[in-house]
Image (cartoon, rainbow, N blue to C red):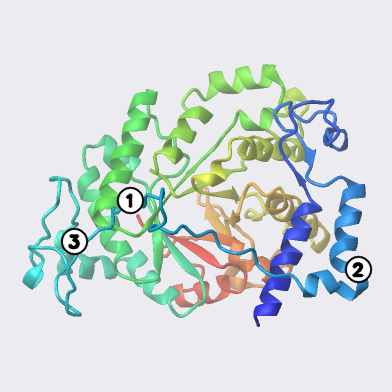
Amino acid sequence: MRRRLRQVLIIGLTLSLLGIGVPAWSEDDDRSCNDLMAADTPAYVVCTWLAKPEEAKEIAEFWLGNDGENLMGAEPLPPITIDCDAPGNSCPDDSVGDGEAHDVGSPDVPGAEDGGTPECQNGEQCYIDPQAITAAEKAAAQETPAGRAAQAVAQTSMRVWIDAELADDYKAGQLTEAAKKIAALAATQPGVVGVRFTSQLGFNQNFTTAEELDKFVAEAATALRALMPGKKLAAHTVMPVFACGTNDTCKTEMTKKYPLLDPERVGTWLNKGYIDQLALDGGLLANGYATWKIDATEAQRNQWIQVRARAWDAYAQIAAEDASMAAGAGSAQLTEEQTTKAISERVAATLQDDAAETVTLWSRWQNDQGQVSRLYGEKWATSATWEQLKKLGSIKPRLATVYDPASPEVDVATDLKNLSEVFGQVYLYAA
């Protein structure tokens, strides 16, 4: 087993050496591979060979030659150790504890006996009251449509998020009460991953100033984290300027039209830890940039280049969201060929761009006129789109959908069972 682990480690290292990395800061650098990128690639996206082709060949021959003799004989590097007793060495002693051995089950902190609150060393908040949400509040949450649906999801393989909108409650001065209801809902089912507390953030919620928007995000995140420690927080928004790429006219117009959706502001939310998952909607990518002759493929490519360049995935999970594959009432379902093309462009390409880790596809939604759009046929009748999606089993954990248990297609149990054939995650809408 140890030999096999060493082989895996060396193979992984070898493959990484054969890859391409960033950055290469000079066009004169003989390790630059910028010539392999498209001519319209932004200047801040650069490329350098970790191992040039001829070097990669030598590396591969070294490890794989003579039936892999060097690979089979590889040993892990010796650990780096420090002798604290050796002359000239100083090892700090900043370990936590009182230096005394304690019996198993005995309290570690004075004041924790018999369920008491531990004393904090510096007066900071270091303890969250588990009774902040009462048993009665949890019981009431379980009886809501979303609460019952969360229990039903346990019969499937899907992970669960609670999907809510706290912006209206915040503007009405009722954030505390609303956050408590949502937190109680998240606590009704142990398998709930977390809460998506807002959608189209900064796009259509009528926030008038950037300061008001920042305050909402900060206060909503703080309230929810205090009520449900350990659960994740998610938000959904749009980044209109990203799809412009290097088109300055487009960027100017999009910034003017959507002044609150400043990438630097969103990056700050991620950096401060307010959001664990950020979903970027693709609704504008289809035809929102035709004025500047940017088609859907280029717009999507531009968006993910911008996301990668900002390293947002270092702070949060990034998701893509798309509702366009669902066929509207009175319109024809996509054919098998059209579905394959749509999956390639809106799912596969998005994941391959390596900026989004998951893709959320709206499987059913209703417009203001009451017309319903679906990925599947009415009452779960078969459709080419749904049958093609069921073939994506290898990436099912990366696919998510949104479901409103108060408006089922057939019934909650049937709907969730069918959705679990395609999706690995579900956002349960809580009104």
Q: Is residue 226 left or right of residue 386?
A: left
* Mark 1 vs mark 2: in front: 1
How far is the residue under mark 1 from the one under mark 2? Answer: 47 Å
At label 2, counting other C-alpha atoms closer than 10 Å, the crowd grade (few under 14, some 14-19, many 20 or more) is few
At label 3, counting other C-alpha atoms closer than 10 Å, the crowd grade (few under 14, some 14-19, many 20 or more) is some
- Determine the image quadrant of residue 163: bottom left
Residue ID for mark 3? 133
Q: Is residue 147 left or right of residue 363?
A: left
Residue ID for mark 2? 65
How far is the residue under mark 1 from the one under mark 3? Answer: 42 Å
How far is the residue under mark 2 from the one under mark 3? Answer: 64 Å
* Residue at 14% in and 50% down: 121
Q: Amino acid at mark 3?
A: Ile
Q: Which mark is residue 92?
A: 1
Asked if residue 236 is positioned above or below residue 78 in the image, the reply reads above
Q: Amino acid at mark 1?
A: Pro
Camera-side residue of 63 and 342: 63
Q: Is residue 261 visible?
A: no
- Determine the image quadrant of residue 37: top right
State the residue lying farthest toward the front: 87
Q: Is residue 299 left or right of residue 104?
A: right
* Residue at 79% in and 59% down: 340
At label 1, counting other C-alpha atoms closer than 10 Å, the crowd grade (few under 14, some 14-19, many 20 or more) is few
